């Protein structure tokens, strides 16, 4: 399959990530995707500030600019207009303010590229959580306590069945609940046992 800017895969190659930032596209790439100029996007944002809050469009810090330059996202002399990141909502919002046939058609592809990337990240996180839960569950105390809790035993019954100190049983139940290893709160749990720490 050919990766062009009019395919989901092609646009996905122009979506970048930085620590503590959501996935984003830069102004120059959005301009190319929407068949317009960077200054047209900048002007559209200036005219419609209510459509582009900071969680839609953000300016890069100097440190982020250096990282992006080392990754060849920007040239070493990138101008200020290029130094903005457009999140999924921001990139999609640009199409609404440009109001061109190209923008309307391509906005769907932009949306799909971001959505696909976000779904992949969710699947990866779920897979990592499942592996972690499996690893924890394989540890004897967690496996034993979660099995007894899921069988409907009370906290006292779990405590007597395991022989663990009561405090350890409560700590294990709290951790099993946090990891969603047990389906319901065992009878006899302290009121705050399953509260967020």
Image (tube, grey):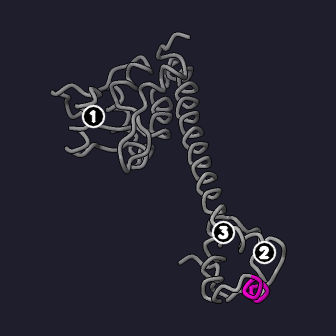
- Coordinates of residue 160 in the picture (x, y in percent): 76, 88
Look at the image and give the residue range highlighted in magenta: 155-161
Q: Residue placed at 38% from the left, 23% from the top?
A: 31
Residue 82: quadrant of the picture: top left
Viewer-side label of 3, 1: 3
Report the disc number at residue 148: 2
Height in image: 10 above or below 137? above
Which badge, 3 or 2, comes first in the chain's sequence?
A: 3
Task: Please give the name of the residue rendered at 56% of the width and 48% of the height, measured from the top-left corner.
Answer: 125
Q: CA distance from mark 3 to mark 2?
A: 12 Å
Q: Position of residue 179 (x, y in %)?
A: 63, 65
Considering every residue shown, the one lying at the far left of the view is 77
- Provide residue 194's location: percent of width, then percent of height: 64, 79
Q: In what quadrant of the picture does the N terminus appear? A: top right
Q: Residues within 10 Å of mark 2 (few under 14, many from 20)?
A: many
Which residue is denoted by mark 3 in the rendering?
Answer: 140
In front: 86, or 62? Answer: 62
Residue 116's disc is none
Q: Which residue is mark 1?
A: 68
Q: Residue at x 65, y 89 (%)?
A: 166
Tell which of 183 and 94 is nearer to you.
Answer: 183
Q: Earlier in the sequence, mark 3 or mark 1?
A: 1
For image coordinates 40% across by 32% down, the residue present is: 25
Front position in the image: 111 or 133: 133
Q: Are marks 2 and 1 in contact (CB under 8 Å)?
A: no
Instruction: State whether the magenta stretch is mostly helix, strand or loop.
Output: helix
* Left or right, 165 with reference to 26: right
């Amino acid at each position: 399959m050919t990766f062009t800017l009019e395919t989901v895969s092609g646009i996905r190659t122009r979506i970048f990530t930085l620590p503590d930032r959501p996935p984003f596209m830069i102004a120059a790439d959005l301009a190319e995707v929407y068949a317009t100029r960077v200054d047209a996007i900048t002007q559209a944002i200036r005219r419609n500030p209510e459509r582009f809050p900071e969680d839609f469009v953000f300016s890069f810090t100097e440190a982020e600019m250096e990282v992006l330059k080392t990754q060849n996202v920007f040239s070493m002399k990138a101008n200020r207009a290029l130094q903005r990141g457009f999140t999924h909502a921001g990139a999609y919002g640009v199409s609404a303010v440009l109001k061109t046939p190209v923008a309307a058609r391509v906005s769907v592809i932009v949306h799909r590229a971001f959505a696909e990337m976000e779904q992949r990240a969710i699947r990866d996180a779920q897979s990592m959580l499942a592996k972690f839960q499996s690893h924890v569950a394989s540890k004897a105390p967690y496996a034993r306590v979660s099995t007894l809790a899921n069988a409907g035993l009370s906290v006292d019954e779990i405590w007597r069945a395991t022989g663990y100190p009561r405090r350890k049983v409560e700590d294990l139940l709290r951790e099993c609940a946090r990891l969603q290893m047990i389906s319901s709160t065992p009878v006899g749990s302290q009121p705050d046992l399953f509260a967020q720490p």
